[in-house]
Amino acid sequence: MKTMNYNKASLNGTIQVPGDKSISHRSVMFGAIAQGVTTVEGFLLGEDCLSTIDCFRKLGVQIDVDGNNVRIESVGIDAWREPAEVLYTGNSGTTTRLMLGILAGTNLHTVMTGDASIGKRPMRRVADPLRLMGAQIAGRDQGQFTPLAIQGTKLQAIDYTMPVASAQVKSAILLAGLRAEGTTIVRESETSRDHTERMLRQFGAQVDVTEGVVSFKGGQVLTGTHVKVPGDISSAAFFLVAGAIAPDSEIVMTNVGVNETRAGIIDVLREMEADMDVVIDDEQAAEPTATVTIRTSSLKGTTIGGAIIPRLIDEIPILALLATQANGQTIIRDAEELKVKETNRIDAVVAELKKLGADIEATDDGMIINGPTQLHGGSLKSYGDHRIGMMAAIAALITDGEVELDDAECIAVSYPTFFEHIETLVKK
Ligand code: SPQ
């Protein structure tokens, strides 16, 4: 149990949020698949990414970690060894789903499982298209849930139209496509994060992307390279909201990843009239970064829905808190995917913010929030979900009275230094 009493402090100063979780996972995966040495700078030492490292070590890949620098040495997939142990993916959906795509085309038998939350997350969305490629995957409830057993085999390319916007499904198919015969094509109606496509290019592969269609020829060999991981915009999101809603505040964040397939929260903050500056460092970088400054803001309600949803899906819990402080109504829609994250994030956000006195209701595909509301203290649950836990802690900055949080440890999944950063920014 963590008790938070910040007495409506203001937040001021500069922080650098930790490395991007999605890119950190992929850097190790690609480094393990590639031939040669891959060096990674700015790697996120969160529990989820450490699970990815652990899985590849069990496959015999040499991975050395020195602070936020990681070195991966591999001679490619064919040199991996069949692990005697189960590959444990912890709380990480990204590890579980992308590994499924990678392992499907090896010549290994592997078994993968994760924690209780992973055990409830749908895997057929990945396993089904992989089966169309010839993958042999068995799992609980007809291949729907972990534990999953994979018998690696030869794969055939497919032309797949995605039923939901999901970077994890797209990435798993593309990674399987690396070992497949023919050209793999993935069609998205709404663009999900494109880190896999960008990284394939960084490792020397040729990928074509035109109007929502990604195509990629199997059999391409990846070569080790250097990967620079930008700060995670999904982590920065918590302090973007904190700076906007806490009194007399100004927070500067450097090296924030602003890949446009991830940066939907910047558009929403602008739309809500937040007092914010975004200065891009290098637009040409494989993953562009920016220095972002946010100040206490007078906000207006908005509607968030449609194509922007995949660009900010993980930021919706904290945007809901932001909306409780905006003038007027905020509607979040088209976000059913929130129901299959670490927990049902629609139900969790609504239940916990209601406990603090927010005017918020769940809908089938999102939520409706009326603001502004002075929030009061309360006893909150994180549901073991890092993003719900961080939302609760940021809410505690502006409540009348203290907030208790049952399980704050889960925050280490993506942001191990989160509470240190709050302490740095809170004026004593
Ligand atoms: O890895 P995990 O547990 O799925 O993490 C989450 C998160 O909040 O950190 C989702 F719960 O992020 C996903 C994100 O929602 C990470 C991700 C990726 O790296 O490809 C893609 C998104 O998921 P999806 O299902 O839309 O593909």
Image (cartoon, rainbow, N blue to C red):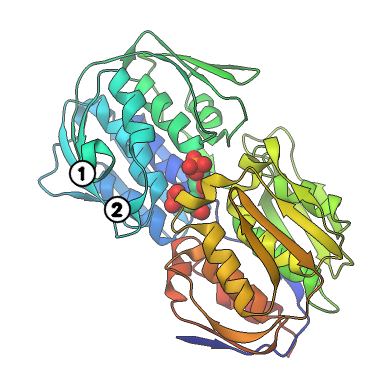
Whether the residue carrying mark 2 lies under 8 Å from ligand 1 is answered with no
Q: Is residue 129 above or below residue 285?
A: above
The residue located at (36%, 29%) in the rendering is 34
- Name the image quarter holding residue 144: top left
In the rendered view, does 101 fall on the left or right side of 383? left
Front-lying residue, 69 or 369: 369
Tell me the quarter of the image containing the C terminus.
bottom right
Q: CA distance from mark 2 to mark 1?
A: 9 Å
Percent position (x, y) of residue 84? 9, 46
Classed neighbour count for the residue bearing mark 1: other residues with Cα under 10 Å, few (<14), some (14–19), many (≥20): few
Classed neighbour count for the residue bearing mark 2: other residues with Cα under 10 Å, few (<14), some (14–19), many (≥20): some
Percent position (x, y) of residue 99? 32, 38
Residue beneath disc 2: 119
The residue located at (22%, 42%) in the rendering is 141
Q: Earlier in the sequence, mark 2 or mark 1?
A: 2
Q: Is residue 118 visible?
A: yes
Q: Is residue 217 above or below residue 229?
A: above
Q: How many marks?
A: 2
Q: Tag 2's secondary structure?
A: helix
| Labelled disc at residue 140 | 1
Q: Is residue 384 above or below residue 231?
A: below
Q: Is residue 16 visible?
A: no
In the rendered view, does 404 fall on the left or right side of 99? right
- Name the image quarter holding residue 153: top left
